[in-house]
Amino acid sequence: MSLDISKLLRENIRNLKPYSSARDEFSGEAAVFLDANENPFNAPWNRYPDPHQRILKARVGEIKNIASQNIFLGNGSDEPIDLLFRAFCEPGKDNVVSINPTYGMYRVAADTNNIVVNLVSLNADFELEAEAVMAAVTPDTKIIFLCSPNNPTGNALDSHEMLKIIEGFEGLVVVDEAYIDFCPEKSLLPELDKYPNLVILQTFSKAWGMAGLRLGMAFASELIIDVLSRIKYPYNLNIMTQQKGLELLANDQLKLEWVALILKERGKMISNLNKYPFVVKVYPSDANFILVQMHDPRGIYNYLVEEQIIVRDRSSIALCEGCLRISVGSPEENATLIEAFDQLI
Ligand SMILES: *Cc1c(COP(=O)(O)O)cnc(C)c1O
């Protein structure tokens, strides 16, 4: 693919000279650091964190089998989503295309940056149709957002349809793989080399159980990663996130065990839910949540709140009419939910 990504950049970003921190100008070992106006007391919190997150990135690269120069680490995946808008979309002029329904942050980031979102509805089975997405592209479309497995629908999108879009679109295609660990479909990560316009988002918030640390990943061609790194806050990942993240990433076995248990619980939950007369439809799930259509979603939601169980009401979202989204919890939490439902029959 011979697409010049730098031509897609906003002009001010192309010309931007990034902030150069003290740790950029000197990053080696030394006995005495008197260059960053830090307080000499209160170690280790007194020191600024590594702005390039070298050690953490090396570990992420090892886990994902990808070079550090193709990795951006952010304050959740929300950070690279916002940075992509700021780098590539001219406010008030450019637009992006997004599937509908999908994750709400693309819209919020678009609105924040004064960018119009052209929505393309999935079909009734929540499937992606590349042709419909391509038909929504205009000359000012800079980014197409896909999410697979998709939130809140739970299904993985067809990878052939996604690749048609990545190959056919002369702008960026973001594929959000926040739930990829729960999904039998393969990640598009091995395709990254072939497509300079592909950005893959993943996160440590779901399968890895680190939502509180705020640690998200973007994988892309070096040019895109360079741009995101130049415009981010210099110290976007604090010391605690970098250190604790590294510590928790030492044990990938634990993540595999969690995923296996969650998948087993998901299967149990789906067959349980199918038994209730107030359930209209349990959608198949490739993620760690289940979308369930109910006869009286608001009533069920309120009943569960009384029982101190909180699920997500998605019933006002297009194509999700009547639906609640239920995360798969621990075996105990799931049993509590099922007991609450049992009391309704
Ligand atoms: C949960 C989720 C994320 C993760 O966001 P973080 O900011 O990394 O916690 C990203 N994308 C989708 C679709 C999600 O559902």
Image: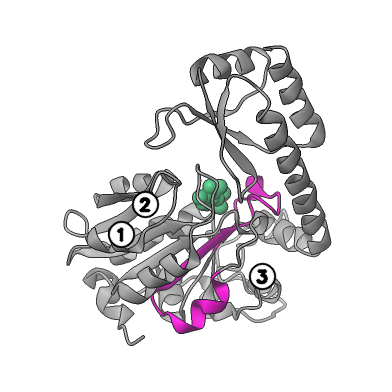
Q: Is residue 186 above or below residue 209?
A: below
Res. 60 mark: 3
Q: Is residue 140 left or right of residue 4?
A: left
Q: Which residues are magenta?
A: 188-217
Disc 1 crowd rating (10 Å Cα; few below 14, some 14-19, many 20+) is: many
Q: Is residue 73 left or right of residue 165?
A: right
Find the distance from the CA under tag 1 to the CA under tag 3: 32 Å
Q: Is residue 169 above or below residue 281?
A: below
The mark lying in front, picked from 1 and 3, is 1
Q: Is residue 276 above or below residue 24?
A: above
Mark 1 — residue?
Answer: 133
Measuring from the top left, give residue 103's x and y in whole percent. 45, 46
Q: Amino acid at mark 1?
A: Val
Quarter of the picture containing the C terminus is: top right
Find the distance from the CA under tag 1 to the CA under tag 2: 8 Å
Quarter of the picture containing the N terminus is: bottom left
Q: Is residue 26 visible?
A: no
Q: Is residue 254 visible?
A: yes
Which residue is located at x 65 percent, y 30 percent?
274
Q: Closer to the N terminus: mark 3 or mark 2?
A: 3
Q: Are marks 1 and 3 in contact (CB under 8 Å)?
A: no
Label 3, secondary structure: give it: helix
Q: Are marks 1 and 2 in contact (CB under 8 Å)?
A: yes
Which residue is located at x 72 percent, y 77 percent?
31
Disc 3 crowd rating (10 Å Cα; few below 14, some 14-19, many 20+) is: many
Q: What's the coloring here?
A: one colour
Measuring from the top left, give residue 165's x and y in whole percent. 36, 69
Mark 2 — residue?
Answer: 99
